[in-house]
Structures are given as C-alpha cells and as structure tokens.
Amino acid sequence: MTRYEQFHAFRSRLNCRILGTDEKRGEGADGEARPGGTLVTKRFFALDGQAYKDGALDTRTKELMGLTASMVLRCDDCVAYHIDQCLRLGVTDEQLFEAFDVALIVGGSIVIPHLRRAVDFLDDAREARARGVTPGCPAE
C-alpha cells in the first residue's frame, strides 16, 4: 500500500471512529459502543469544512492557503490532506510548488523536511490517481 493509500485508509478509519454512528465506531471491551466525538468535535469538523467553501476566495485558493499554513506549522498529515484536495480541484504541480515557495519564505529552513515529504506525497498521489485510485472518506 502506498503512502497515499495508507493516508486515506487511516484517515477514513479514524474519521469513522470519531464522527461515525455507534455501528461505525464499533464496540469496546465491555461490549458497548465506543464513545465518539462530542458535539464540539463534530461542530469543529463541520466548521473546518465550511471554511474552505467558495466565498470571496475560491476553494482552490483557500486550499493552497491551508497547504502553506500547514507546511509552516509542520503538520505532515495536514500537508497531505491539502495536497490531495488541491489535486482534486485541478491545481497544477507548478502552482503547488509556488505555494511550497511561500511556505519556505514564511517558515524558513525548518520547512525543508516537510517540503520533501510533501513532494513525496504529491508524487504518490499523482501515481495513485493515474492508476484510478481515488479513495473517499466516508465519515465526512
């Protein structure tokens, strides 16, 4: 399984665990449904999704902003998520690399390891999409 596929499998499994119904969350050791996210957690996830919808700024621009912020904040899972969303929206590799440049300027050399992982994920994602792999995230 590629990093791209692992990312989606992990994300989908845990989103079901956090946001899913009792059946999707499964049972704990006591046989009862495992607890999931609270109303606050669910509202935060919903707010996050709403923030990236078209408004004065289009979704593509917002995803590129999220990508650069995630690189500066050094969150590899967030970087992968935003790269995937950018690909879904038709952002080109040239546009992604310009966003990477902004992250480098803002964040400095500490961003370089995250840039490497971002490019590796980008390559995996492009290859997976070329093979027709477009995993979904059922709990979102």
Image (cartoon, rainbow, N blue to C red):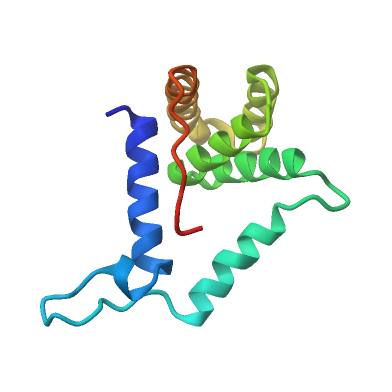
Residue nearer the viewer, 18 or 122: 18
Residue that appears at 52% across and 34% down: 111
Q: Residue furthest left?
A: 29
Residue nearer the viewer, 38 or 32: 32
Look at the picture and state if 137 lies above or below 35: above
Residue that appears at 88% across and 51% down: 56
Q: Position of residue 92 (x, y in %)?
A: 67, 21
Look at the picture and state if 103 lies above or below 13: above
Q: Position of residue 78 (x, y in %)?
A: 50, 46
* In this picture, residue 54 sits left or right of residue 24: right
Q: Position of residue 91 (x, y in %)?
A: 68, 27
Q: Position of residue 9 (x, y in %)?
A: 34, 44
Residue that appears at 60% across and 30% down: 87
Look at the picture and state if 117 lies above or below 75: above
* In this picture, residue 137 sits left or right of residue 6: right
Report the number of numbered marks. Answer: 0
